[in-house]
Amino acid sequence: MKNSYAIENIDCAMCALKIEEALNRLPGVHYAALDFTNQRLHLEAEDLEQVRAAIARLEPEATLKELPEGSGAAEPETEVFRLNRELVMLGIALLLFGAHWLFGARLQSLGVPGLHLLPALAAYLLAGANVFRGAWRTLRRGDLFDENVLMVIATIGALAIDAVAEAVTVMLFFKTGELLQNLAVSRSRRSIRALLASRPDKAFRQTTTGLEAVAPEQVRVGDTLVVRPGEKVPLDGKVLSGDSRLDTSALTGEPVPLHARPGDAVMAGMINLHAALTLRVTRPFGQSAIAKVLELVTSAAARKAPTEKFITTFARWYTPAVVAAAAAVAVIPPLVLPDALFRTWIYRALVLLVISCPCALVISIPLGYFGGIGRASKNGILVKGSNYLDALAHLKTVVFDKTGTLTHGRFELLEVVPRNGRHPKALLTHAALAEMHATHPIAQSILAALRREDITLDGDAVSGHTALPGRGIRATVHGRTVLVGNDALLHEQGIPHDVCEVDGTAVHVVIDGEYAGHLRMGDAVKPEAAEALAGLRKEGVEQLVMLTGDNECAAAAVADQLQLDAFHAGLLPDEKVAVLEQIMARAGDGGKVAFVGDGINDAPVIARSDVGVAMGAMGSEAAIETADVVLMTGSPMKMVTAVRIARRTRTIVWQNIVMALAVKGVFVVLGAMGVASMWEAVFADVGVALAAVVNATRALHSRG
């Protein structure tokens, strides 16, 4: 079983990457993913103490902590203190280096050898204190390719060739950039937490002596809570008393209020807007809707996009390659070229060393993806991993289920058409009795029609009930065998009938093997469906297809109204999978295929697609478990928003990749040619890292 832990005091993205790789090599560790952006370790291991020991060997100051149930993003307790301490040390170092420039000549005139260098060396030691400690820890475990080790080698090399001012400048630039980078990452984390700040922190439980304030985790199923106006609903429950409206935007991304009355279900994270509500808790906090949302979003980084995996591999080889190049630059030219000085070429090699860490990519790429996932969650879209966000950005084909996805899924009884001497009321009653325990939208619509006619059903009349997936239902009503279903059911049973397709959806009824007639049902297309499909085409989706178990006539009407590229009607669940596989085969490697359905009845086809999308899944555990992407409302426009956010995130990620590689490539060449100085190289290196982090945070503010 995978668990998540808070990991603190990791302030280096490459360190996090090395810890992740080391843990995955341990025997007994089946899975490890360290999310540096969110300070989380996602782990499946047999021995946690073995994991702690491995982390301590690599990063002695790092701590691993259990996360409370239903928690959101982990926030390191010492982060602010550590950053403030480093800021003070850097400030003192800058003052000392300033003193070197202001008073160095005066100190040199005193005639004491090396006295004028003391302020500069003090600034170097103070600014590099943490760098030296990190380098020593890294060298003890035999790792030469670490940014701290390379920075120490580069600056000591500069001191050795009498470039004191440059060595100090490089260390100060490096620490300033690192500090600004850490501050930017910390700010991004706070932005993400603010974006996900839906977690209730207090519940008011009703007791015999009044109300007591408790943490949501302390509330038990069956407890009675009071939620006053302006407060968040702390746990999922059912309203006992009160009448109010709730802001559901934390879950759905939509500002449309929900009317809550006695008997209605409400979910944690909703905000009470008007009057006090009393509710009975139906689920513990860890299983509540908002806890699942937060857990899904903060665990999403464990599923890495192909781009992230590429950067991980690139980082593993980039630093050794640049170090090897630096060694070659330092040694080969002085031995081969006439009049070449070792001092000149060693300096050029040191320039290469200071740009040998791929931190800009290792930090900013995961941060960009997580920002996109956080932005999507704010819009009521749960993306279970950056790999799925990446797949959304590459969609070329979107396949929709019809009922409840493109249409409302709220059928209306348009006509009762009896056959073989049956009475319309008797036909409708038999169909309703057979369907009275079913949850399908058509069944609910038939029952609603009876309620409007004030027809009372005798539940005792039904003595048997068997679902026939994709076809209908069989029940025993008043001792008679009743079949209710689609045209495929009639053909399967060999029942003679005179109607196969109607204008709408035909629900056929068979009593004791004789065709009794059909009910003609209608289901309206959602008003925003056409706009959503147009939006998907605008975002680059080339094929829009519909799969449905409904008849050809009803499917053709919807497909024509929405101008779909293709549709397939009369499909059973396993046939939908087969058709989807054909669509995916035609798509090939040129683009991803998504299937959008309700996440419950379409579980097999959702699981088979490149990106399985469950729509209208607020409060549905089955949908959240099944799908790769969960749209919390039933609006098809959410799919457009998801694709837009994914594509903007992909753009930001590739901007960072191109920018970082271009800057580093240019300075590798300039450094080897002797054009770039050490301080210019380190300024470019930390500058591009900072720019990449700031650019990555733009994904947080992507608009759908």
Image: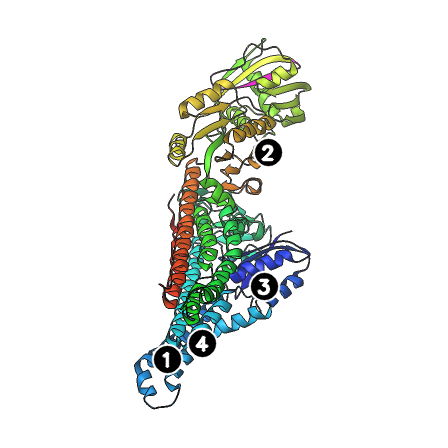
Point out the frontmost of discs 2 and 1.
1
Earlier-in-chain disc, 2 versus 4:
4
Which stretch is magenta?
A: 500-513
Total marks drawn? 4
Furthest toward the front, the residue is 338
Give the residue pinned by disc 4. Answer: 160
Q: Amino acid at mark 1?
A: Leu
Earlier-in-chain disc, 2 versus 1:
1
Q: x, y (%) of residue 699?
A: 40, 50
Q: CA distance from mark 4 to mark 3?
A: 40 Å
Q: CA distance from mark 4 to mark 1?
A: 21 Å
Tell me the crowding category of disc 4: few under 14, some 14 to 19, or many 20 or more residues within 10 angstroms, Cα based. Answer: few
Give the residue pinned by disc 3. Answer: 64
Point out the frontmost of discs 2 and 4.
4
Q: Is residue 359 visible?
A: yes
Classify mark 4: helix, strand or loop: helix
* Label placed on residue 96: 1
User: In this view of the protein, which residue sits in the foreground, 80 or 479?
Assistant: 80
Residues tagged 2 and 4 counted as in contact (Cβ below 8 A): no
Q: In the displayed structure, does residue 252 sit left or right of residue 110?
A: right
Q: Amino acid at mark 2?
A: Pro
* Label placed on residue 671: none
Which residue sits at x=54%, y=47%?
A: 237
Q: Is residue 67 visible?
A: no
Q: x, y (%) of residue 625?
A: 57, 42
Q: x, y (%) of residue 401?
A: 51, 30
Give the residue pinned by disc 2. Answer: 604
